[in-house]
Image (cartoon, rainbow, N blue to C red):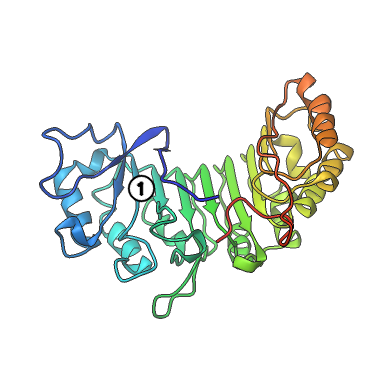
Amino acid sequence: MALGYLSELHGLPVYDFPLPGKGPATLPDPESVAWKLSWHEQNGEDDYAACFDRFLDTVDPARVRALVLGAGAYGTDNDAADPRETAEQLAAAADRLTGLRALYLADLDCDESELSWIYQDDVSQFLVPFPRLEELAVRGSGGGFSGGMGLEFRPLRHEGLRILRFENGGLPAHVVHGLADSELPALEHLDLWLGDEGYGRSTTVADLAPILDGSRWPALRRLGLQNADIQDEIAAAVASAPVVARLTALHLGRGTLGDAGAEALLSGQPLLHLQELDLSHHFMSDAMMERVRQTLEPHGVRVDLSEQEQEDEYDGRYVAAGE
């Protein structure tokens, strides 16, 4: 599945900050949209840093609620800034972006960069200068700049973060370790795309244990462990995980979930308290799909069983977003 551009962040529609001299006479109210900043050679500016500076001088930065960083800030070729420089530039503007509550890193489609190729670095550094940030989403996990090690999340304490999402074709285990060692008392929604081992997934079910035991983040109510080539194993672990008892939403879709994983869920702890269970993009049989519906839907659980897939003749099951 090819990823398209983000349409909304923090409940706000994404709005592309216009090219120099190309925008409308009147821009949206700074608080009414999620501003997307992108740079290409045709921008008419030297680099992404120039685009970012122009944004700060054009829009009242203190009233900006959400930022989406696109091409130029991220990528895989010579048009991309080093992600460390992108982080440093944003941190330097923290005293001007005092209203920032949501940040999305690397909104690129597959024509700009495949998911597993997007250069990332330590993304926890985006949280430190913004203690009031409530939402952080990260696309991609690759490394490649001189000295770059790829996606990292170093342990930290952050009082304000409520939503954290990692969209990956392959999630490294050390990211999960750093996350599990972090103190995030306000975290309500965690979404991890684990990906495919062939594209860098080293996270295992054992690495997820500190998350599944439910002791880390008392406010957690929505959990996604999806897009995994080990989705049946994850489902089996979730079936007895203490954290599930206090969730309102559980997302296990986008991956290789089959009848074995679904059977584990139905045979494990009750899921009737959930408001939603997302199992979309799966490899379940028709009979198992009907069992899931009959078990949960009469109790008010919204179950997503869309995108029933068939195993590939050569490659078997596949995740929704890998390369």
Left or right position of 236 against 216? right
Residue 18: name its quadrant.
top left
19 shown above or below 42: above
Vertical arrangement, residue 152 with respect to residue 5, above or below: below
Q: Is residue 218 visible?
A: no
The residue beneath circle 1 is: 68
**Percent from the top left, x then y, of residue 283?**
75, 45
Question: In this rendering, would 119 be left or right of 284?
Answer: left
Element under label 1?
strand
Going by the picture, which residue comes out furthest to the front? 313
Point out residue 165 in the picture as x, y percentages from the top left corner: 53, 49
Judged left or right of residue 195, residue 59 is left
Give the amino acid at mark 1.
Val
Residue 97 appears at what percent x and percent y?
Answer: 27, 47
Please tell me in which quadrant of the rendered image residue 174 appears: bottom right
301, 288: nearer the viewer: 288
Q: Is residue 250 in view?
A: yes
Q: Which residue is pictured at 39% across the width and 48% down the height? A: 103
Task: Examine the image and state in which quarter residue 240 appears.
Answer: top right
Question: Where residue 265 sits in the image (x, y, percent)?
Answer: 82, 41
